[in-house]
Image (cartoon, helix red, strand yellow):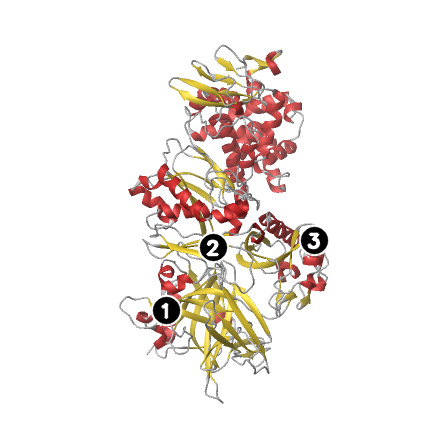
Amino acid sequence: MAIAVAIAGCGGDSAVELSGSVRRATPQFAPVIGTDSATFSAPRGNYTITRSGTGWQVKDNAGGDGTTTLTNVRSIKFSDVTVNLGVADKAASISAADLKSLIELYVAFFNRVPDADGLSYWIDQFKAGQTIEQISQSFYDAAVQYTSLTGYSSAMTDADFVTIIYKNVLGRSQPDADGLNYWTTSLANKTATRGSLVKTILASAHTFKSDATFGYVADLLDNKADAANYFAVQQGLNYNTPEDSISKGIAVAAAVTSTDIIAAVNKMDGTDPSFNLNGQTVFFGTAATGAPFSGARITYSDRNGVVVGSGNTSTTGNYFITLIRGATPPFVVQAARDDTSLYSVAPDTSSQNINVTPVTTLVASRLSPSGDPARLASELRTSADLVSTAKVAARVTEVTTLIQPVLDATGVTANPLTAKFSADGTGMDRALDSLLIKITPSSATSTNIEVAIKQQASDEAQPVVAQFTSATTTLPSLASVSAAVLPPSGTASQIGDLLQRLNKCLALQVSERVSTPNVNPSTADAIKASACKDVFYGNDPTTYKHNGRRVGTGPRTQLNAIFTTDGTGMIFDRGFYVFSRTNGDIVFAFRNTQTTGDSGTGAFVARLTASDGKLRLIGNQYAYDGGVNAYHQLREFVNQPNSTYYSTGYTFNVANDGTLSKVVVTSPTGQQFTLLSNSGSSNMTLAINGLPSGTNFLRMRSVYASATNTGNPATAEKHLVFNPTALTDADLVAIPQQSTWKFDYYLKGNTGTTPNATQTYKTLARALSIDELRTKPIAALQPGVVTDIIGASKATGFVALEGFKAEDMDIDWIVPPGALPPTQVKVFSSRKNATTGVSESFDDAANFGSTQRSALVPCTLQSATDTHCINVGGVLVYAPGVVLNGLHLWVRDYDLREFAHFYATYYLQ
């Protein structure tokens, strides 16, 4: 099979004779340049290549060479690379699966991308009858002849060979003992050759696709194949020197990760996204919110709503996608991650850079007849003109005009849709950090929109916002803003750095982190690892205070993970800027993920250390507990379905620790509400007629779920707390997303009108209107659980809990598509006080990860005077007279909004 080919040296001054199999399997040398080729003196990046009838046009972008028309040429040589113009057609002559198998041989043997000429040769051999296994053996035979180039030798042991393949295919530096033994035994028993074994290991790697533990193996291999396909087939590239073929081909493959190929593409010389030999369109860009929108799934949908390309965003928020052949614009772009999606549009292929950000999401919203960017892809099916080039340009101009004050302050002049930028907290990314854009559908045809500037202001100030709907024809304007009050340049990177340092701390063993591992209680001064101290302001964990809580374990503590084995390996990521406090401290939100895969959300307060420019945790330095969150509830009456209703409002979160007599909360509109201590509740609860209720949830608006029930739930639910004057949906929408609430604290014994302390809190997002809430799917109890509750409560409206222990409170649920998975089950109970005759309220909860679908709820004492649980045989059980009147499934989203599906057993009159 060997054929002689001349391999030109740099400049073509020398030649070396190698067999064809060695020439094509080993790292590629410079191709032969003959009469069917054209040569240009500058690098490939200086030229634009386009098809022209039966030939090609090569335009010198600098103008020196003008435009050259070429016919009957198979390759074009530039100073850095040579383009093989026929490789794409040849690749199309075999199946995509077979092409991928050939490409993967380059990855497996040499961990590099193939040159177009080499791949073209092996396609010919495959079409001539050679099997993939035979070609694999040829790769090995060639590799051992050139040890200095390939690292293989005929003298290497089977274990050495398997180790190299594991590294190249699986991305693992060393094979596991069982795997090594299995594969070396196959070689020793002659059931496989080294060539055939590679093919087998490649096939095995693909079986891990979507595996929770080893799925990255298949993803990494797929991404290396995609990068190689782009380089050799779509771009048709060959490096011009042996050295470049080896070093640069390996460098490209080494830059591929299991999540993206962006870094690999950036290492390729001579690529041009507007040029594609097989007629496929390439798009790339940045998905960011101010922080990189990493780990998101990017999809491109065409005018028929068909997904024509998909991929993942990298850790830097970048993506790179090749659309299927024949994909026709316009395209709607979605970046989906967990419960959050960003959107964008590509009306044509004039720009391959398409960003996906809150700003482009607003552009997509303005293009959608409903204002809901999630519906734009389906709306496009009925009217392709929705995303025309002219309409997109008009909406980009409209949105740019709206946010111009922020663009001016951050020095951004580029098009937010198509201009390249990095998610590093500078330029456009700083502008994104400075903007709060919320798009909330209220029906299938209408959407509420708010745009605000996240600027440093006094802690009690209300934000200035621009609010409008999808029906608004002329957008409002934002006031001018100084760069000095916007998040400082680089804030996103500083937040990311802080979370990485926290992860570095938690990567240590607990005995390395603290002097009192797994001890409850423990205090901040037990932290001994410098990597952990570095997370806190002044390198001193004892300075941290947040809502009266200190770092440690036990009551009223935070960051318990540092002190426990369960915290080892916990990951904090996806941090994003929320706002700056009066003193300049940064408030940012985050996600935390346990080693079990369960995740949650929260917010930190950090302070900049001037000496090294790093953020460190400080807390809000408040002395007392507090907080306000938007809260939403579907209250389902299992024995009286027509009474089921929706409520929306806010919860006030002040721990019921016995130190306070009351807390007076002032809303953004000036209304005041009082929280009182309740012995059976974990939180202070809202007052009703001067007495504590059983709830900290203020219902701003409530509406029955059934259209046939036009009554007011407030008239039927006397034990709950409703706003004295129910707000309308319009009233709710008018409250800014990041509204400010004031908490006045009165200690025990303070009967005067002057509070002992005042603290302010901002919401990350406002409460939804009822119409907005109705659009949200919600988790639900398993039907069998509901049936059991109905059976136990139908006669009385309550479930007697006397003697119930955790095993008797086994709750199961389901999560429909689009719904957030619950992370808490809470049981609500009551008992009439034998002395006073007053009904006392209690609550018990089980908290868990987002992947769970069942939980046990134990009876738990909430205070020293709480008697709703009694000890029986060393186990806490419910006391006599305690009855269940409801339970809920609860979850909090990334904006810290809370959603609960409450199941009530009692009857409304």
Q: CA distance from mark 1 to mark 2?
A: 28 Å
Mark closest to the chain's N terminus, 3 or 2: 2
Residue assigned mark 1: 702
Quick one: quadrant of the C terminus? bottom left
Amino acid type at image mark 2 = Ala
Residue assigned mark 2: 452
720 shown above or below 889? below
- The residue that appears at 42% across and 34% down in the rendered structure is 323
Place residue 309 in its image quadrant: top left
Residue 834's spot in the image, x, y percent? Answer: 48, 88
Mark toward the viewer: 3 or 2: 2
103 shown above or below 815? above
Residue assigned mark 3: 531
Pointers 3 and 2 in contact (CB under 8 A)?
no
Q: CA distance from mark 3 to mark 2?
A: 37 Å
**Viewer-side residue, 452 vs 227:** 452
Q: Secondary structure at mark 1?
A: strand
Q: CA distance from mark 1 to mark 3?
A: 49 Å
- The residue that appears at 29% across and 43% down in the rendered structure is 382
Amino acid type at image mark 3 = Ala
